Amino acid sequence: MTSAPDFRVRRVYEPPEADDGRRVLVDRLWPRGLSKERAELDEWLKDVAPSGGLRKAYHAGELDFEAFEAHYRAELAEPDHAAAVGHLLDLASASAVTLLTATKEPDRSHVTVLVEHLKQRPGPGR
């Protein structure tokens, strides 16, 4: 039996910590005002972020969080997103993975939904 994957959530603007493991940016857009050097990330995985249309609708207030979550979960099942989810699960089988976002409120964003989704998926060896 393997242990549950270790996914952490942090804002990309925060300095890295020793226990971050792999640092993966999971936003579709590059964070405003942040250089690639300062971000100190291992990779940028745009394909796991919500579509541009869904992101814009949520930020414009056209969708509440529950509707956004339902739409985003549906997107995560699509092939491009599913491949990115599989990649994150593969990374988590080797070490902790810190999911980075520029979102001001990570608890009410796609990252929270993504972590829940990842924890419900079977990963390698599970």
Image: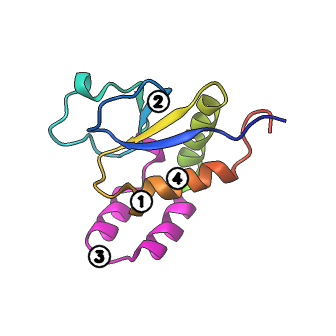
Q: Amino acid at mark 4?
A: Leu
Sequence-earlier tag: 3 or 1: 3
Say left or right for 67 vs 120: left
Sequence-earlier tag: 1 or 4: 1
Residue at mark 2 to residue at mark 4: CA–CA distance: 17 Å
Q: Which residues are magenta?
A: 46-75
Mark 1 element type: helix
Q: Residues at badges 2 and 1 in contact (C-beta under 8 Å)? A: no
Residue at mark 4 to residue at mark 3: CA–CA distance: 20 Å
Queried whether the magenta region covers residue 57, the answer comes back as yes
Residue with the mark numbered 1? 107
Number of the front mark, 3 or 2: 2
Number of the front mark, 3 or 1: 1
Q: Is residue 121 above or below residue 24?
A: below
Residue with the mark numbered 2? 20
Say left or right for 4 vs 106: right
Q: Quadrant of residue 5?
A: top right
Sequence-earlier tag: 4 or 3: 3
Sequence-earlier tag: 2 or 4: 2
Q: Is residue 8 above or below residue 59?
A: above
Residue 27 percent coordinates (x, y): 36, 45
Residue count near mark 1 (Cα–Cα under 10 Å), binned few <14, some 14–19, many ≥20? few
Q: Amino acid at mark 3?
A: Gly
Q: Residues at badges 1 and 4 in contact (C-beta under 8 Å)? A: no
Give whichever of 97, 85 is nearer the camera.
Answer: 97
Residue with the mark numbered 3? 61
Residue with the mark numbered 4? 114
Mark 4 element type: helix
